Image (tube, helix red, strand yellow):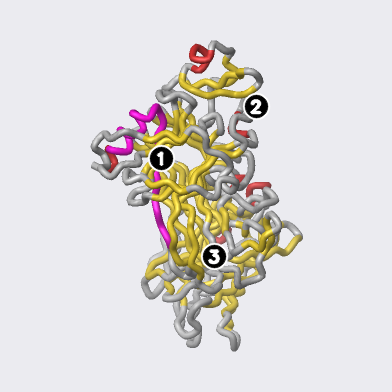
Amino acid sequence: MKKVLKIIAVVLAIVVVFGAVITAPYGISFLSSQNDIDFNMDLSFGENMIFDGENYKKASVSTDENGVTKIVPEKKSVEWFNYYGVSYKSKDYVKGTVCYNAGLKEKSENFFLEPAEKGEFFSFIDNCLEGTKANRINYITLEPVNNKKSGITVKGIALFNREIPENEIFVEKDNLKVGIDLGWGGALSYVEDTNSSVEAVSVDGKIKVDSNAGKRYNAEVVNSNVNLINRNDTGRLVQQSYYGTLDYDFGVYMENDWRYNPVQGGNQYNDPSKIVDLRVSENSIYIKCRPLDWAKEKEYITPSYMEATYSIEDGLVHASCRFVDFSGYPEAESSQEIPAFYCIEPLNNFVYYKGDKPWTGGELTYEKNLIFWPDAGYPHFYSKENWAAFTGEFDDSFGIGLYVPGEEEFLTGVYMRGETTNEDPSRDGPTSYIAVTKTRTFKSFEPYEYEYYLATGDTTEIREAFSKIEK
């Protein structure tokens, strides 16, 4: 038993305090392959940390004149791991660096911690999805990024050998199949209505999508498993994207100086954001990523995190989104997309409620000739029912709607209207776009959260589904 314990656990005792030195416990554990979603480190915040019935206090700890604390474990060689957790207490936002060996190569990567009384942070190591694993811990450094006087108490680090997930993750319930792509930051990339007989057909070389489209268009069905979300590149999808300052080393996009722009999917070059964490249950997916800066190369990964939980609830897709930035860049007021929503272009009729008596069954408004939104002067529409949808070309066509509680302003348009030719329209260039827009000040060290819902069906079904949320 003692031999097994020595193999699976080496526990260090430390407290890291910036500007002061205090003694407290710190643990490190090495666990076998973990395939479930429960990664509980079981690290209490008592005076002594107990791991598998024993106390351990073995680490070299030093703090330099800049308040950077370096932790060097006595035992560096470990079993293979690709995922780690940190248990801590902090009044500050903290930047950490973990240095390890992946085989014979030394690698280091940054992570960030938010203030917490009893905090836990988990992360895959870099390139984990490509099979990279580590087998040696060299050191860990920690420093506050917004306050040089307070400190952080680290209770432990746990190392895990997680099963490498598939690139696409799906959950299915009721009438919906929902999926994300880990190659694009875990942004929502797949929504299929499995009960509405949605079909894609080819008419004069162009793709049309509707319920029972084969009969409606008297055409051959080319796709009966239609994904409603456009996933042609990292800028599409349904995703988080935030606009910050230009007062930094900005990038260039479409010949324009481009402000700080963390994007969940990745950058303009189709490089993916880093997957930090993933948890999958029967009907929900939790994802955390470290986004790239849209206009810059992949080396410029932003010091920020985006989190999202996608679940299927009462026939709706429910997404809870969260963002926190650690850059310290100057504040900047800008119109934000909450979220950026791209669906397939054959659904190109924009539908919303234009009246001033929401949820009374008032007449809906149809915009049937929208074009590319920059060419149209960035048109905004306002709906007091807080939802809008794109449907097929008929008033009773099938479609997909977006609802954001409390938000009335929608920027929308259609790119390459009527030009979809791919039998899988989700992978074609044309797309229909909605951004629920909200002007707010982008601030570092200030978490931001919002939620949205998606519904499928004809406009009556979509409206009815969203009305139940209001009730």
Compared with 16, 291 (above or below) is: above
Indicate the quadrant containing the C terminus: top left, top right, bottom left or bottom right.
top left
Residue annotated with mark 2: 421
Which percent across, then down, holds residue 223? 58, 21
Judged left or right of residue 230, residue 296 is right
Residue annotated with mark 3: 244
Looking at marks 2 and 1 on the same chain, the residue that comes earlier in the sequence is marked by 1
User: Distance of mark 2 from mark 1, alpha carbons?
Assistant: 25 Å
Which percent across, then down, holds residue 443? 48, 69
Classify mark 1: helix, strand or loop: strand
Which percent across, then down, holds residue 77? 65, 63
User: Distance of mark 1 from mark 3, alpha carbons?
Assistant: 26 Å
Q: Looking at the picture, which amino acid does disc 1 mark? A: Ala
Q: Nearer the viewer, residue 458 or 75?
A: 458
Confirm whether the magenta stretch covers residue 96. Answer: no
Classify mark 3: helix, strand or loop: loop
Q: What stretch is highlighted in magenta?
A: 448-467
Q: Which mark is residue 388?
A: 1
Residue at 37 percent across and 51 percent down: it is 407
Residue at 27 percent across and 42 percent down: it is 358
Crowd rating for badge 3 (residues with CA inside 10 Å; few <14, some 14–19, many 20+): many
Judged left or right of residue 438, residue 58 is right
Q: Nearer the viewer, mark 1 or mark 3?
A: 1
Q: Looking at the picture, which amino acid does disc 3 mark? A: Gly
Crowd rating for badge 2 (residues with CA inside 10 Å; few <14, some 14–19, many 20+): many
Compared with 247, 379 (above or below) is: above
Q: Which of 150 and 366 is in front in this view?
A: 366
Q: Residue 404 carries which label?
A: none
